[in-house]
Amino acid sequence: MKLLVGFVLCLLVGVGFTWCHVPLGMMFGSLITVLVLKRTGLSVPVLPGSMTVIQLSLGTSIGLLFRDFSFGAQENIAFLLLLLLLCLSLQFTACYLWCIHRLRWNKQEALLGAVPGAMAAVLALASHIKTPPQKIIISHSLRLITLTLFAGYITDGAHTSMVMPPVLFATTNVLWLLGIVFAGYALGRCLERFHFPAPFMITSLLCAAILHPLSPQTVMFPDIINQFSMALMGILLGHHFIAFTLMAFLRHLWSSIQLIAIGLGVTVVMALTAAHMLDYPFYLLMLSWVPGSVESMSFAALALNANASFVMANHIIRMLLIQTIPAIVIYRKKEVIQGNSAKMRKPTKPL
């Protein structure tokens, strides 16, 4: 019963924040509620399949935009991709060198701490190092919360309406929407086996983008589902922090702030440069290149009625790169260590 009360409170506070025109109110309302209830002894459950619901909601709602939505500035897409890769390289290099030379972390800790985002991948990789990954988890958790707040600041003034037009309940709209969601879920289960990042988001986006043009009418996605997904996202973010004691958090707070400032500073410089060179919106480049959660940044882009497909595409590319490269580096290093150990254990022939 207590778990149900906590979950309902998260939804009610989120609705209250939304009615008070707080940016990303459902997300921040749930997040704050989780942190406050923790102090009172109440716990808010993380619903099973929360991330799947979030990914399906985001992928479908953004994929549906492709019918009448353009990436814009098509001639600059290749150049923007190169700038994304340069931005990622600078973010990682600057944070890695800072971890090594200023924070005195070892190379494995610095490698994981410097990865720009994708905390789930970082946690999976952290299990392969011998030292406790507490400082890495706190660093990435604080980065995730800070950049989510940043997304909320950018969307200030962009208010979301929860009014559902009658066309949402039309039989054609419901059937097409269910077909797109089920197709995205089924394909996402297959893609999940190959350890792709955000599998349900990718497949639901592709299904919506491919199937929507076949529909005789524009398919509408209920915004109330996006609002519910934001509440689930807020609960997930809140649980990242309640897992740590206050002393552990404070011990690694300063190093985390330094890494956030470096990553955000690199992003600001790159986004300003690209915006000046290509006459592209600065806020859109910031949402696309900042090393935050793809879900949070995509929600912010939707709230701004911005080019959410461009934002999501940039973050998916970033996630693919940063989940692959550190894993390969750590795997290769582990092979070298095992090879050296085997050589040392190899018996010598008697004279």
Image (cartoon, helix red, strand yellow):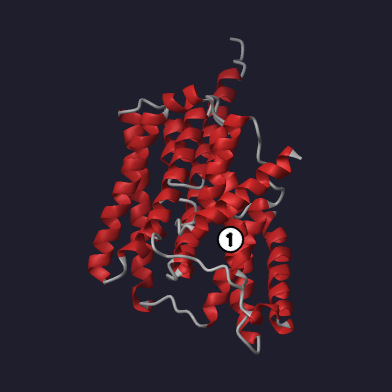
Image coordinates of residue 236 in percent, x first then y, are 59, 45
The crowd level at tag 1 (other Cα within 10 Å; few <14, some 14-19, many 20+) is: many
Residue 221: name its quadrant.
bottom right
Image coordinates of residue 297 in percent, x first then y, are 46, 58
Residue 213: name its quadrant.
bottom right
| 344 or 219, nearer to the observer | 219
| 106 or 275, nearer to the observer | 275
| 275 or 83, nearer to the observer | 275
Which residue is disc 1 drawn over?
227
Farthest residue in the top direction? Answer: 351
Name the side, left or right, on which 267 lies relative to 151. left
Residue pictured at 24% horizontal, 61% vertical: 273
Marker count (numbered): 1
User: Quarter holding the N terminus?
Assistant: top right
User: Quarter holding the C terminus?
Assistant: top right
Q: Is residue 151 above or below residue 101?
A: below
Name the side, left or right, on which 285 lies relative to 210. left
